[in-house]
Image: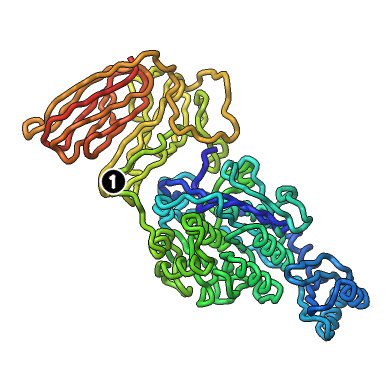
Amino acid sequence: MVRRPVQLLVGALVAGGLGALLVYPSGHQAQATSTTVPIAAPPTDHRAAAAMSSQAALRVIVSYKHGIGAAAASKIETDLGLHFVKGLPDLRIRVVEAGSIDQAKQARAGLQGRAEVAYAEPDVILALQDNVPNDPSFPTPNSAIGGGAWGWTMTHTTRAWDITTGSSSVVIAILDTGLKPNGLADFDGQVASTWNVLNNTTDVTTNAGTHGTYVAGIAGFVRVGTDGGIYLSAAAAGLTWAADHGARIANMSFGAPSDSITLQNAISYAHGKGMVIAAAAGNANCDCPTYPAADPGVIGVAGVSNSGSKAGDSNFGSWVALAAPEGNMTAWPSINGAPGYAPIGGTSSASPVVAGIAGLLLSKNPSLTNTQVEQALESSAQPVNFSVQHGRVDALAAFSSLGFSDPQPASAPVNTVRPQLLVETNGDWNYQPLTAAPQVGQVLLRDQGAWTGSAPLIVASVSWERCDASGANCALASTAPRYAIQATDAGSAFYFVVTVTNAVGSTTIASGLSSSVGATSSSSPSPSPSPSPYPSPSPGPATTTQTLAFSGSLNAGNPIRSFTVTVGSGSAHAQLSFTKCSSLSLTLTNSSGTTLATATGPSVVVLDATLPSGNYVYIVTGGKCSFTLDVTAQK
């Protein structure tokens, strides 16, 4: 599985049925567009929700005044027929349970009337803020695989990654329903620590819900509940545990229509320890305050669609601080029966975007206070066409408000991780590098590689080339982002060519060459390997190299110069040097004239490629001056 860009993975804490996961911040540049995809609804555990609701009606949270010890509290509870469930010492509360709903109501009234009691309230269920649109074209059509993570570019997070891609010293706590990481490589090496507040262990995967995995796939993870919901007391316990264990940011993608003294106290406790807290605004499409999003000390987050308008399900109003993209790609424990990646809607997926960007700010400057981070996020927010207090979060603008700017100079696209061939393992929802011979019926995907350069970077074109087994006699097979291997492809080898553009220029580069379709392979791909940054074509490397030197000049009569080379299979390194031109372009084509790679810039222009054996042409254009061209390649 290829690691997908995420808004942020920052050290992870996981707290019980409600879990806390601390994950490390990381960012990866990618071109994010979108496509027409069928969206499978996440499973809803209605029976679990009903069972939790019935149980919650029996539970009471009670806070005693200072000076009332455990023995005195226990006697009061016993006299009222209540059973002790657990205590939260940081918040000076106890959770107790009655034998019936009527008894619970009477006990609450009895507790509230006692001089020893500060307050008593129901231990209500906080609903998970999750939703999948029923629009089969969600998000909008384009060429991205599986729907595209358009939120990265909308919030300018891809540009903010030029400033920092995160730090392992910054921890985000995701208070949610546990983590199911099997088969999802995005979580490899990203979880710092976990805690389960339901059973006071570090196990957040056994009986974990799916909601926590969706949310953690966007930002990071404390287990505090199940897919049926989250007890108010568990949410408070998870938040205080995360604050006590070094989390700088917390995300809470759940809520209830009424406020709670217990949750307010937990928020005050965590905020007082310097924590930035984000919470989902809710999915009722109304101006109806939802808690904890509407609580002081919390950044309430509404959702926007990929058009920039309010997401159809999102709550709104002046009580909501910010908006953020909802419907981004994230991790699914099961889609079509297997782990994968797909869009998920609801403000549950918007809130962790804000948490992730807060983590980036703290990664760049760990000395920032939580209020400084909140001010940076809110003061730099971009306008939206619906009611929220500040606007839509923007990572680059938030950095700018703190005095940081993109350090990258204006430049044409530069490839930093070479494109590679991928093969689908679960439809569009999961895939991995192609490490064996492709087979008839498999679907190949393009990984355009990693790029840097002036924004915006755009994947302008992709072309699949079908060649003979040696990599010669190539012809265009397709310009789609994927290619399904046909029976007529038997014996052929494939590579693809990708062109990335921006306002400064364009760069074209080719992937490595596959083995012949249908060839037997001695090994099969591992389940989820990390991508190799520079995959080489299948033919074995040559044992010797050659250096070819050319020189020439460009003028009005000869604006283009071309040089043919014959090389063996392997890497080819070209350097174009000149003194009297501000810039020149160097292009590499195969024998049929298909462009494989190109680079433009001041001297020295470098063009690297991995090539099958054959004849190739280097073309120099773009100025009026003399130059030298040196090519080092396999014989």
Q: Which residue is mark 1?
A: 411
- Name the colouring of the figure: rainbow
Residue 618 place in picture, x, y as percent: 23, 26
User: In the figure, residue 596 lies in which quadrant?
Assistant: top left
Taking the image as shown, residue 629 lies to the left or right of residue 243, namely: left
Q: Residue drawn at (57%, 58%), measured in percent from left and top?
A: 132
Badge 1 element? loop
Taking the image as shown, residue 274 lies to the left or right of residue 46, namely: left
Q: Residue drawn at (24%, 38%), measured in percent from left and top?
A: 600
**Around disc 1, counting alpha carbons within 10 Å, would you say few (fewer than 14), some (14 to 19), or many (20 or more)?**
some
Report whether residue 584 is seen: yes
Taking the image as shown, residue 153 lies to the left or right of residue 69, namely: left
User: In the figure, residue 340 lies in which quadrant?
Assistant: top right
Residue 252 place in picture, x, y as percent: 62, 63
Which residue is more in the foreground, 163 or 252?
163
Which residue is more in the foreground, 29 or 337?
29
Vertical placement of residue 156 versus 573, above or below: below
Q: Which quadrant would the C terminus be assigned to in this image?
A: top left
Residue 134 place in picture, x, y as percent: 55, 58
Q: Amino acid at mark 1?
A: Ser
Vertical placement of residue 335 versus 114, above or below: above
